[in-house]
Amino acid sequence: MDEGIVLDRKSFEALAVESRVRILKSLRQRRKTLSELADEMKMSVSGVKEHLQVLEQAELVRKMDDGHKWKYYELTKKGSDVVAPKELRVWILLSISIIALAASAMAMLYAGVPAAQEDTNAPVLKALPVTAPMAGGANETPLPREDHAQAGSDLAVPVAVGAISALTLAGCLLVLWRNRARG
């Protein structure tokens, strides 16, 4: 069950300023230092620091102090859910549709290939058409060979899976593109 994102008053207040939203979107790519964020946002270091403190109080970002000279800021789970709530699901669906599309292409490619014979030097004998007598015994009509009828039905599932996978792939790419265009 999808619980959604629960935002409290502090979160709403933090998100009310566009600079803070831009900081969150920037941190979606990777964790960054205060100086990196200030350069990217074209703001003063002190201004970005104030915004980051508000975002920290709202539990949207956290400062990573691992004992090194530089302190990094990164999104919390709550912050990443606000910035890209369903993007992970889209990436998973995109991956699955690529795998399904490749599998259906392979199935379609190999559907018409006969099984390899054990002795490649042996002569290949062509089967004569099987015939059935007509009523009255006048003429014989060829019966359809099973492999021709089965070849069409063997392709039905891979073609359907390929079509669905291609549509899903296109939809996922559209969603990801729209998310990047907005952000």
Image (tube, grey):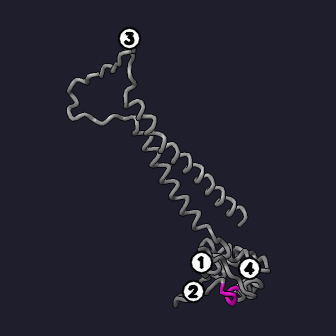
Instruction: Of the two numbered discs 2 and 3 on the same chain, state the one appearing first in sequence.
Output: 2
Instruction: Of the two numbered discs 1 and 2 on the same chain, state the one appearing first in sequence.
Output: 1
In the rendered image, the quadrant that contains the C terminus is: bottom right
User: What is the number of the mark on residue 64?
Assistant: 2
User: What is the number of the mark on residue 136?
Assistant: 3
Q: Main secondary structure of the magenta part?
A: helix
- Do the CB atoms of the residues marked 3 and 1 lie less than 8 Å apart? no
The residue carrying pointer 4 sits among few (fewer than 14), some (14 to 19) or many (20 or more) residues within 10 Å by Cα, namely some
Q: Is residue 87 above or below residue 154?
A: below
176, 116: nearer the viewer? 116
Instruction: Of the two numbered discs 3 and 4 on the same chain, state the one appearing first in sequence.
Output: 4
**Number of labelled discs?**
4
Callout 4: helix, strand or loop? Answer: helix
Q: Position of residue 123 (x, y in %)?
A: 22, 23
Which residue is at a point 37% across and 35% down the rendered structure image?
A: 113
Q: Position of residue 84 (x, y in %)?
A: 65, 71
Instruction: Of the two numbered discs 2 and 4 on the same chain, state the one appearing first in sequence.
Output: 4
* Any part of residue 53 in sight: yes
Dot 1 amino acid type:
Arg
The answer for how far apart the CA atoms under marks 3 and 1 are is 86 Å
Dot 4 amino acid type:
Arg
**Which range of residues does the magenta coloring cover?**
55-59
- Do the CB atoms of the residues marked 3 and 4 lie less than 8 Å apart? no
Q: Position of residue 1 (x, y in %)?
A: 59, 74
Callout 3: helix, strand or loop? Answer: loop
Which residue is at a point 34% across and 18% down the rendered structure image?
A: 131
User: What is the number of the mark on residue 31?
Assistant: 1
Dot 3 amino acid type:
Gly
The residue carrying pointer 2 sits among few (fewer than 14), some (14 to 19) or many (20 or more) residues within 10 Å by Cα, namely some
Q: Is residue 98 magenta?
A: no
